[in-house]
Amino acid sequence: MSRKKVDILIENVTIEACAAEGKALTHWDGAVVFVPFAVPGDVVNIRLTRKHHNYYEGYVAKIVTPSKDRIKPFCSHFGTCGGCKWQPLPYDIQLEAKRQQVEDQLVRLGHLDVPEIRPTLPSDKTMYYRNKLEFTYSSKRWFEWGVDPDSVPAEERVGLGFHVGKLFDKVLDIKRCYLQKDPSNDIRIFCKEYAVAHGLEFFNIRENHGFIRNMFVRTTDTGDLMVILCFFHEDREKREAMLSALAEAFPQITSLYYVINTKLNDSIGDQDCILFKGEETIRETMEGLTFRIGPKSFYQTNSGQALKLYSVAREFAKLTGKEVVYDLYTGTGTIAQFVSKNAAKVIGIEYVPEAIEDARANAAANGITNCEFFAGDMKDVLNESFIEEHGRPDVIILDPPRAGIHPDVAKVILAASPERIVYVSCNPASQARDLAILSEKYKITDVQPVDMFPHTQHVENVCALIKK
């Protein structure tokens, strides 16, 4: 895609609507202009920075007249962190913008024939709704423009927080985050202060050296708490001292893990998570079911909304108790077990072996006997011989990663020819692409957006399909 840098100031333009990726849009000189952190109705001056073939990108240089709908952001990090870009938008406007985003992806870009899209299901919590956060240590934290890092005391040049948008090596030191309930903030602050006080080297993300590199905090509605500290190399004395201090300061930690990650990225899916103290898993409950969650387990990040999301999936499946259901990308088997009482048999498939172990343990603990779980890459596991062995599905429920499904998986689904498909997606764009393939044999009958992430542009979407 051709683009070039520009430096153009346009004045007194009115923001027209919300747009993709959490941005807002207006028009200038016959082209669309995209800017972040703006609200429809704002009259603004915009500094254009990039020109593409048929649109511009820029930023708001000045709010001339704020929109009547604009509200004050509640977080002091707003505008720099970038994690909750829609804080100035009233929640009802956020919900409609998400419904519109789904419509744009499925209809305008995907050219799909869909029924009227239902209003977005709101989240009961719009703050402290996440059950998992990852924080990154940085030896050179992000400073606001105009601040000379050399003028700041050495102990204040380090940070523990979130990556600044589109800057892989820049970390914003977070003072207070409104995404996760207590004691998440206190744990993060303690871990930073301990590392500074004991001279532990924060990780240099660009040069790849240092000692302590990132941490995960997972909470549940049952009150369980998991913390994972990740180190770049082993130093047993320093590591054990920090973990012991953390365990003593927060005795409510249910599971305390550590990881020695020598790779050049922070993902721990391929790393050994070693239990330092406490239980191997934490627990979450949903509609009478209990799910154990390990350090690598996937579980919907907004626990309260997960119940609404899965309830929609079960409604769209229209189960009578006689069906064979395939739950693809099953994770820890949450959807599979959630629908199991309404099905004859449920087959769950997931590529993370540890998640499948959790799924099997969850099913056993919940007394569910009609679910079977299998680990492996979906395109390799889900083939005709597998279907012949385990039964042809009457209903397929799929909840893939953001990238959507592999074309080979789509082919197998079409060949399996279930009566119904329920497609749960965290990315309506990839969902639209996959639905276009499935539309060869299926018709979309229902579309329900669900808000899992208030104050962000992200939306979960559930589509019901029946065989033509």
Image (cartoon, rainbow, N blue to C red):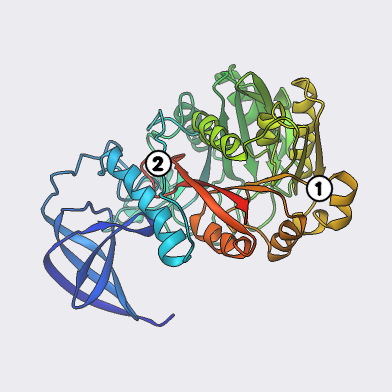
Measuring 75% from the left and 54% from the top, which residue is drawn there? 378
* Residue 2: % across, % down: 40, 83
Measuring 65% from the left and 61% from the top, which residue is drawn there? 441
Q: Which residue is mark 2?
A: 120
Q: Taking 446 as reference, is 175 left or right?
A: left
* Residue 346: % across, % down: 76, 37
Tell me if mark 1 has few (under 14), some (14-19) or many (20+) residues whose alpha carbon lies within 10 angstroms of its own: some
Does the rendering let one see residue 278?
A: yes
- Residue 24 placement: quadrant: bottom left
Decide which of 223, 450 is in the foreground and name it: 450
Label 2's element?
Answer: loop
Instruction: Say what amino acid the circle numbered 2 marks.
Output: Thr
Label 1's element?
Answer: loop
* Residue 91: % across, % down: 30, 38
Q: Taking 55 as reference, is 66 left or right?
A: left
Q: Which of pointers 1 and 2 indicates the residue nearer the eye?
A: 1
Q: Are marks 1 and 2 in contact (CB under 8 Å)?
A: no
Tell me if mark 2 has few (under 14), some (14-19) or many (20+) residues whose alpha carbon lies within 10 angstroms of its own: many
Decide which of 150, 461 is in the foreground and name it: 461
When the figure is inspected, residue 15 is found, relative to residue 293, above or below; the finding is: below
Does the rendering let one see residue 82?
A: no
Question: Earlier along the polypeptide chain: callout 1 or callout 2?
Answer: 2
* Residue 370: % across, % down: 81, 30
Q: Which residue is mark 1?
A: 392
Instruction: Say what amino acid the circle numbered 1 marks.
Output: Arg
Q: Residue furthest front?
A: 468
- Residue 321 placement: quadrant: top right
- Residue 336 placement: quadrant: top right
For the C terminus, the image quarter is: bottom right
